[in-house]
Image: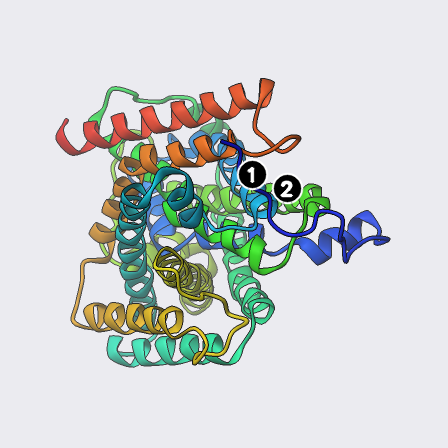
Amino acid sequence: MVLATGGDKGRDGRAGLSTFARFLAVAGPGVVVMLADTDAGSVITAAQSGAAWGYKLLLLQLILAPILYVVQELTVRLGIVTGKGHAELILQYFGKSWAWFSVATLCLSCIGALLSELSGLAGVGALMGVPAGVTMIIVVGSLLLMAFTGSYLSVERIAIAIGAFELVFLIVAYAAEPKAAELLHESIDIPWRDPKYLYLVSANIGAVIMPWMVFFQQSSVIEKGLKPADMPAARLDTAVGSVLTQLIMAAVVVATAATLGRAGGVGSLDTVQQIADAITPHLGDTMGKLMFALGMSGAAIVATIVVTLTAARTLAEVMGHKHSLELEPREAPWFYGIYTAALVVGAVIVASGADLVAISVGVQVMNALLLPIVLGFLFLLARRLPQPYRVQGAWAWVSGLVIAATVVFGVYSGVSGLFG
């Protein structure tokens, strides 16, 4: 069965624009989801990687960039061509049971991610002397105001502006003055058989390819009204985001490796304070804390926006309710209700106290173990698209092999790390 296309293919509101102008008009969903990908949990996972293994996990960050693009490019195709969300397509072509199963795994991932993001923000607040409860009130209040009073485009712009603060990690990595020879030597000296190393490999894979990213970007290209003519620009948007997010992850690994992860030594980071102390010694106490707070806050806030919107959109979608930021709260009560409940419950749990590092790394490993479900449906749906958008030929082989390898290694390293 071939997936039906959504919308009018012949209508292109951006016709006549130059290539660059079209890119600026289309860009957003890919950059937002990739900035959210480098979330609080990912930053912590990268910091743990550098502290414990030096530069030995740096090469993995670069390898994951094209893999991330291959996966997210499929979501762009599905959203633009069909005009339907991921859960809706699974419901339509695989039935209600598989749709709810897929949504259940998504919600599990979103809950873990949300707790991780809010815990990261509470940690930043504590770094600045602000109690967790006060931080949660400010964060939840601001995000509710943003969603209830804005549109998709306004939320997208806010997310990009906040997420841009993550770029400070590139400055922090440069300030750490890593030694090039040591970096090159350690990055290819890989202890494949060490279960503790494999655990962090799995955590990094889970930190890069997350279930909620697939659902969010597919829904976002629909809500932004992108058409098949926008496909090249949307792919470039995704490619730019893929490279950007992995450069940020690599920067965190380099920063912690240069300060804690000496060859043959194993460091440990158990709190946000310790991570801040580890990656900012060359910037001075005040400037270091400020830059770390900006980077971590940008990462956590944009990810909080994405995961809560994803959970609210997908649950409302699979239940057959309206789910768009373009609608007023009274027009989409389920969507806004789920969004609000997720933020409030997550904030209450975090304000009561939680082990940030344990939650963050564990969530990333869980994401790796969920990859077979998420990526399996993604590939099968992409194979059902109509011509010429169907994944076929050489690209189908490339996509299939990349997905299979990612799934196998992600699950293997996750199990090995947990039980090895």
Hey, which quadrant is residue 346 in on the image? bottom left
For disc 1, the neighbor class at 10 Å (few under 14, some 14 to 19, many from 20) is many
Q: Position of residue 223 (x, y in %)?
A: 56, 60
| Residue 358 as seen in the image, left or right of residue 214 | left
Whether residue 342 can be seen here = yes
Query: Residue most toward the front?
Result: 1
- The quarter in which the C terminus is drawn is top left
Distance from Cα at disc 2 to Cα at disc 1: 6 Å
Q: Which residue is mark 1?
A: 73
| Residue 328 as seen in the image, left or right of residue 352 | right
Q: Are marks 2 and 1 in contact (CB under 8 Å)?
A: yes
Residue 125 shows which numbered tag? Answer: none
Of residue 184 and residue 282, the one placed in the foreground of this image is 184
- The residue at 60%/33% (across/down) is 386
Of residue 397 and residue 289, the one placed in the foreground of this image is 397
Residue 235 shows which numbered tag? Answer: 2
Whether residue 129 can be seen here = no
* Looking at the image, residue 300 lies above or below residue 63: below
Upstream in sequence: badge 2 or badge 1:
1
Going by the numbered disc 1, the residue's amino acid type is Glu
Hey, which quadrant is residue 157 in on the image? bottom right
Of residue 221 and residue 7, the one placed in the foreground of this image is 7
Going by the numbered disc 2, the residue's amino acid type is Arg
* Looking at the image, residue 202 lies above or below residue 87: above
| Residue 352 as seen in the image, left or right of residue 247 | left
Q: Position of residue 54 (x, y in %)?
A: 36, 35
